[in-house]
Amino acid sequence: MAMNGRRIIIDGQEIWVPEGNVTGRALREYTGAPPEAVFYRISPQGHEVIEDDQVLDIQEGERFGTLERFVTGGRR
């Protein structure tokens, strides 16, 4: 079956996204990741955190990931 759009990888899963620009929020929704999770782009330069309102020009084969946000205790 032919898909319209671009193939990307999010958390190891192949996802098809529409052609053109998409927001970080839209990508998060494709994964089903909770709103409090950190969404990031993986590149040779490192990891870039993607904000929900950030508009992205997605390229074929790009890789993304999500991490649960957590709070650590401070030193006393």
Image: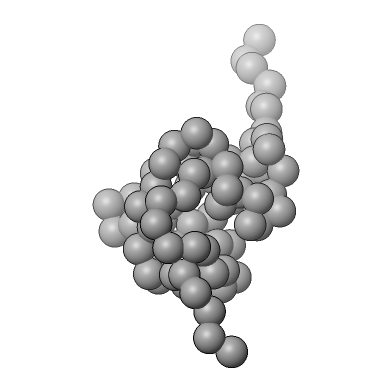
Whole-percent x, y for residue 52 in the image: 54, 36
Instruction: Mark yes or no: residue 59 visible.
Output: yes
Quadrant in the rendering for residue 55: top left
Left/right placement of residue 56 relative to residue 72 reads left
Asked which colour scheme the image uses, the reply is one colour
Q: Which of 37 and 25 is in front in this view?
A: 25
Instruction: Mark yes or no: residue 12 visible.
Output: no
Left/right placement of residue 44 relative to residue 3 reads left
Q: Which residue is the extreme one toward the bottom?
A: 1
Q: Which residue is the extreme one toward the top?
A: 76
Whole-percent x, y for residue 47 in the image: 39, 48
Give the tally of numbered discs. Answer: 0
Whole-percent x, y for residue 51 in the image: 49, 35
Q: Say which residue appears at 54% left-offset and 69% top-offset.
A: 16
Indicate whether 7 appears above or below 50: below
Quadrant in the rendering for residue 35: top right
Indicate whether 60 appears above or below 1: above
Q: Which residue is the extreme one toward the left?
A: 45
